[in-house]
Image: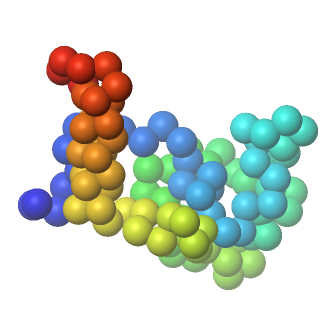
């Protein structure tokens, strides 16, 4: 691999796979708060394509920590491997050009 992810666009915010997330707004009753932003995650962080790896004013010194199951988040080779595995499974299930 060349270090890039092939034709992948992540729609879900990085916050959704962060260990610091306390209440995901995608869940019923979720409010979009984390230990860094107890009053609510700012849209500039939530919708950022750059992630939250560096300190940002107001984050209390807490940045992104991937959940254990997402420890490879951001590793293009790992992500491409998983997409390839998923494509093979889809081909088995549905045949053709999945």
Residue placed at 57% from the left, 72% from the top? 68
Q: Residue 14 falls in which quadrant of the image?
A: bottom right
Q: Is residue 86 visible?
A: yes
- Determine whether, in the image, residue 90 is placed left or right of residue 36: left
For residue 70, above or below residue 10: below
Q: Position of residue 4 (x, y in %)?
A: 19, 55
Front residue of 72/86: it is 86
Residue placed at 84% from the left, 43% from the top? 30
Q: Position of residue 85 (x, y in %)?
A: 28, 47
Residue placed at 74% from the left, 78% from the top? 60
For residue 20, above or below residue 92: below
Q: The C terminus lies in which quarter of the figure?
A: top left
Residue placed at 78% from the left, 39% from the top? 27
Q: Position of residue 44 (x, y in %)?
A: 59, 49
Front residue of 77/51: it is 77
Q: The N terminus lies in which quarter of the figure?
A: bottom left
Q: Residue 66 falls in which quadrant of the image?
A: bottom right
- Determine whether, in the image, residue 47 is placed left or right of residue 8: right
For residue 6, above or below residue 1: above
Front residue of 18/89: it is 89
> How many numbered marks, from 0 up?
0
Q: Is residue 8 visible?
A: no
The structure's colour scheme is rainbow
């Amino acid at each position: 691999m060349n270090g890039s992810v092939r034709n992948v666009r992540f729609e879900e915010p990085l916050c959704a796979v962060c260990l610091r997330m306390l209440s995901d707004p995608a869940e019923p009753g979720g409010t979009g708060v984390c230990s860094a932003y107890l009053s609510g995650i700012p849209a500039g962080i939530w919708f950022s394509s750059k992630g939250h790896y560096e300190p940002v004013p107001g984050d209390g010194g807490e940045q992104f920590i991937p959940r254990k199951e997402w420890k490879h988040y951001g590793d293009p080779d790992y992500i491409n491997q998983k997409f390839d595995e998923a494509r093979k499974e889809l081909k088995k299930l549905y045949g053709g050009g999945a």
